[in-house]
């Protein structure tokens, strides 16, 4: 019989799901892993002794030992699975985005609140030590009044594994910017997207968002960039910060805007802890204490609303055609 502390079930054990499994197992909280692939489940049983496996999501929602479910499946499946889990009284951690439709995200948020359940979205960067150090520096006024933010998330992805690169990557950018500048998106100023294959699945997107505190943020995401780039620029009237997450260390640098040459003024210190471990610990802590997650349902809804507005600008009246795209096929198609 499973230890009562092992109450987490994970649905979806793909590339990212394996990391979720690894962390909850290390935290002595993993009960069961659900996936459709027999080889994947066999590897789970071998690598994580004592972990139950199943191919049936119903096993997770009907098992009284499982108090919390992590939904790590393609984004277009999130709403149905999260809704079902909440309706069965389970706390839920869902990989970003919480949904691909704002009204669905709002429904999930309201359902969790009505039932007194924890609903947490995998906005991983809200738990990144360097991001949190940057947020502290902004709050301390080191950069002065924030004027502009630029977030670039560019990489190669050989599978069309989402509705678009925007839905795959931009939830990180929008949620992170909102978090560090402590403001919500006011409106999407512009949004463009391109498909290098000439279909409806954009693999390059550019979004400009005005936040409620007046900050302008430009967000670029790509599945086709051969050189990985993961950077955040925050510019204030006194200083600028650049966070480069591709670097092994010294990811965060500060620059003085008041002096010629943009001289480096500081390399801030922060704890080097895996962000995902901190995120998983936070989920368990919220379950045990009833605390609202840092990346809770409200945060998830706000992020999806901004991305939905951007998608409407990108596609206009043709946006509805995206609902007919076969995303299962797209995930196996090479770029």
Image (cartoon, rainbow, N blue to C red):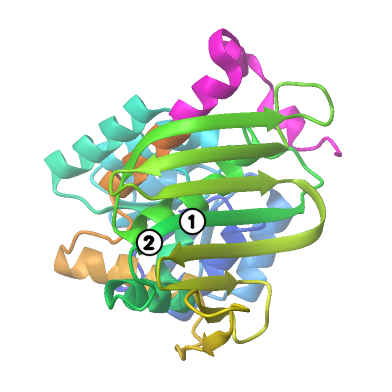
Determine contact: label 2, label 1, CB under 8 Å.
yes
Please give the name of the residue rendered at 63% of the width and 79% of the height, measured from the top-left corner. Answer: 261
Q: Quadrant of residue 314?
A: top right
Residue at mark 1: 149
Residue at mark 2: 146
User: Where is 19 relative to 84, above or below?
Assistant: below
Can residue 309 be found in the magenta stretch? yes
Image position of 325 (left or right of 127): right
Number of numbered labels in the structure image: 2
Across and down, in percent, residue 252 comes to: 54, 79
Image position of 285 (left or right of 123): left
Count residues near mark 1 (Cα–Cα under 10 Å), then give few for <14, some for 14-19, many for 20+: many
Please give the name of the residue rendered at 65% of the width and 63% of the height, measured from the top-left corner. Answer: 230
Furthest toward the front, the residue is 260
Q: Give the magenta part as a residue range.
A: 308-335
Q: Secondary structure at mark 2?
A: strand
Across and down, in percent, residue 143 comes to: 39, 73
Q: Secondary structure at mark 1?
A: strand
Furthest toward the top, the residue is 317
Image position of 270 (left or right of 311): left
Across and down, in percent, residue 184 comes to: 31, 46
Across and down, in percent, residue 17 comes to: 58, 58
Please give the name of the residue rendered at 71% of the width and 54% of the height, measured from the top-left corner. Answer: 154
* Quadrant assignment for the C terminus: top right
Observer-nearest residue: 180 or 322? 180
User: Where is 254 relative to 94, above or below?
Assistant: below
Q: Is residue 122 visible?
A: no
User: Where is 266 relative to 312, above or below?
Assistant: below
Q: CA distance from mark 2 to mark 1?
A: 8 Å
Count residues near mark 2 (Cα–Cα under 10 Å), then give few for <14, some for 14-19, many for 20+: many
Image position of 297 (left or right of 308): left
Can residue 233 be found in the magenta stretch? no
């Amino acid at each position: 019989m499973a230890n009562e502390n092992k109450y987490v079930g994970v649905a979806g054990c793909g590339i990212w799901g394996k990391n979720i499994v690894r962390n909850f197992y290390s935290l002595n909280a993993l009960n069961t892993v659900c996936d459709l692939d027999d080889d994947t489940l066999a590897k789970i049983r071998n690598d994580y002794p004592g972990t139950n496996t199943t191919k049936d999501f119903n096993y997770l929602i009907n098992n009284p030992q499982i108090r919390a479910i992590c939904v790590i499946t393609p984004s277009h499946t999130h709403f149905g699975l999260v809704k079902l889990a909440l309706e069965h009284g389970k706390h839920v951690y869902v990989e970003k985005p919480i949904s691909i439709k704002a009204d669905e995200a709002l429904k999930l948020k309201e359902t969790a609140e009505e039932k007194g359940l924890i609903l947490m979205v995998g906005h991983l960067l809200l738990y990144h030590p360097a991001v949190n150090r940057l947020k502290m520096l902004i709050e301390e006024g080191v950069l002065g009044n924030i004027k502009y933010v630029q977030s670039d998330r560019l990489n190669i992805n050989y599978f069309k594994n989402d509705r678009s690169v925007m839905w795959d990557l931009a939830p990180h950018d929008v949620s992170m910017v909102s978090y560090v500048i402590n403001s919500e998106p006011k409106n999407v100023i512009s949004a463009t997207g391109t498909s290098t294959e000439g279909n409806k699945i954009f693999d390059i997107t550019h979004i400009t968002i005005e936040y409620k505190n007046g900050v302008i943020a430009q967000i670029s995401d790509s599945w086709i960039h051969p050189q990985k780039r993961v950077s955040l620029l925050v510019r204030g009237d006194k200083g600028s910060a650049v966070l480069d997450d591709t670097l092994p260390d010294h990811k965060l640098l500060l620059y003085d805007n008041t002096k010629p040459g943009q001289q480096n003024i500081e390399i801030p210190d922060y704890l080097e802890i895996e962000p995902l471990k901190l995120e998983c610990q936070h989920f368990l802590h919220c379950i045990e204490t009833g605390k609202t997650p840092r990346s809770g349902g409200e945060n998830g809804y706000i992020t999806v609303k901004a991305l939905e507005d951007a998608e409407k600008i990108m596609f206009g009246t043709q946006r509805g055609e995206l609902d007919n795209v076969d995303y299962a096929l797209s995930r196996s198609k090479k770029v």
